Amino acid sequence: LMTLVEALLHPVFDKGTSDFQPTNLEVTSIDVGNPATNVIPAKATVTFNIRFNDTWTAETIQAEIHNRLDKAAKRKKYRAGKTTPVDYELVWRDRPSHVFLTRDERLIEALSGSVEAVIGRKPALSTSGGTSDARFIKDYCPVVEFGLVGKTMHMVDERVALADLETLTQIYQRFIEDWFEQGAS
């Protein structure tokens, strides 16, 4: 099992691009479904999440993962004298998070202006926040991702300061008011 996990993690997928961070694969769970400490499990399950950049498509990243696992499954030095490859099954559970960039300058400027009006400085435009659920609506309407950041995002104890939430609310309110005022004129 660990041979397969190692193949998922190394080598790195890429070094990133001018617009996006490097592709990142995180193992989120390893489970053998076995509460006993003295029984060899019959099977093991590994769950992972991958966020890929514009170097890849959903199809090419999936092919790369299959290729890595196939090669690792056949490595004899890890098979302790066994001649058959490791038997594994790969199940894709979620829709891929396709990479996208918003190029709607009017939308970007409107949100940037709202941020500047509320906090007194222009935001740095960046894709470093990762992909959110915006990927599901990007093909149907213009999207700009904007929200809170913090060291505990996606962790068990995820939290934000109330003051940050209040500031975010003010920015959203300013943006909505300005956007519809501009649209009406």
Image: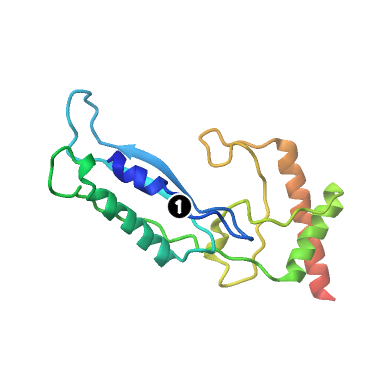
Q: Looking at the picture, how far across and down is residue 110, in whole percent?
A: 79, 64
In the depicted structure, whether residue 103 falls above or below residue 78: below
Secondary structure of the residue carrying tag 1 is strand
Q: Quadrant of residue 38?
A: top left
Between residues 116 and 178, which one lies in front from this camera angle? 116
Outermost top residue: 38
Going 59% across and 36% down the picture, which residue do you hit?
Answer: 152
Q: Which residue is mark 1?
A: 50
For the point 28% across and 49% down, which residue is it?
A: 72
The relative height of residue 41 versus residue 106 in the rendered view (above or below) is above
Residue 28 located left or right of residue 37: right
Kindly indicate the quadrant of the structure image that contains residue 175. Answer: bottom right
Which is nearer the eye, 28 or 1?
1
**Residue closest to the far front:** 77
Q: Give the amino acid type for the residue marked by disc 1 in the picture.
A: Ile
In the depicted structure, whether residue 88 falls above or below residue 37: below
Residue 163 appears in view: yes
Image coordinates of residue 99 in percent, x first then y, are: 54, 63
At 81% from the left edge and 74% from the top edge, which residue is drawn?
Answer: 184
Q: Please name whichever residue, 179 or 30, is drawn nearer the observer in this view of the structure.
A: 30
Please state if 68 lies on the left or on the right of 154 as rendered.
Answer: left
Quadrant housing the N terminus: top left
Establish if 54 lies above or below 51: below
| Side of 106 where 153 appears, left or right | left
Q: Residue furthest bottom?
A: 185
In the image, residue 120 lies at what x, y percent? Answer: 87, 49
